[in-house]
Image (cartoon, rainbow, N blue to C red):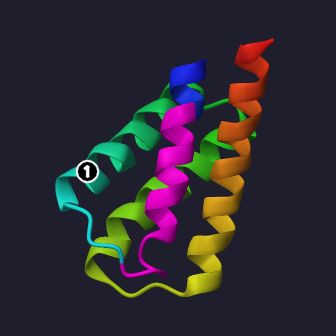
């Protein structure tokens, strides 16, 4: 679960990257978007999976379009919170 938590935190940072104009290769963004979508399909019964699906789609769309900042920051906060909780649960 630690790896999933770390990957969620990286995905959250990738959602925020557009706000700060940080250049990151598109392949890395696609990789984490696919990770979120695959993880969402594996745990589809969980409400968090729907957040993962939307965040994965937002990651892909953020490459091609300028999305509203509040949308990206909101989902980055949700995914980051999920990642942080996953990390804390894995540590104990």
Queried whether the magenta region covers residue 8, the answer comes back as: yes
Q: Is residue 40 visible?
A: no
Horizontal and vertical percent position of residue 61 = 35, 71
Residue at (77% x, 34% y) in the render: 85
Horizontal and vertical percent position of residue 23 = 26, 72
Image quarter in which the N terminus is found:
top right
Q: Which residue is mark 1?
A: 28
Near-viewer residue (34 or 6): 6
What is the chief secondary structure element of the magenta stretch?
Answer: helix
Element under disc 1: helix
State whether residue 92 is above or below residue 80.
above
Horizontal and vertical percent position of residue 38 = 41, 33
Queried whether the magenta region covers residue 61, the answer comes back as: no
Q: Which residues are magenta?
A: 6-21
Residue at (37% x, 81% y) in the render: 21
Residue at (33% x, 63% y) in the render: 60
Q: Is residue 25 visible?
A: yes
Question: How many residues crowd mark 1 within 10 Å: few (<14), some (14–19), many (20+)?
Answer: few
Where residue 78 sits, quadrant-wise, is bottom right
Q: Is residue 46 left or right of residue 8?
A: right
Near-viewer residue (4 or 60): 4
State whether residue 30 is above or below residue 71.
above
Residue at (19% x, 61% y) in the render: 25
Image quarter in which the C terminus is found:
top right
Horizontal and vertical percent position of residue 46 = 71, 33
Where residue 89 sits, quadrant-wise, is top right
Q: How many marks?
A: 1
């Amino acid at each position: 679960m630690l790896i999933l938590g770390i990957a969620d935190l990286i995905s959250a940072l990738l959602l925020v990257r557009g706000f700060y104009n940080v250049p990151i290769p598109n392949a890395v963004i696609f990789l984490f978007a696919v990770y979120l979508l695959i993880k969402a399909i594996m745990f589809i019964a969980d409400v968090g999976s729907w957040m993962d699906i939307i965040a994965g789609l937002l990651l892909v769309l953020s490459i091609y379009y300028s999305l509203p900042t509040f949308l990206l920051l909101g989902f980055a906060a949700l995914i980051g919170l999920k990642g942080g909780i996953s990390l804390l649960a894995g540590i104990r």
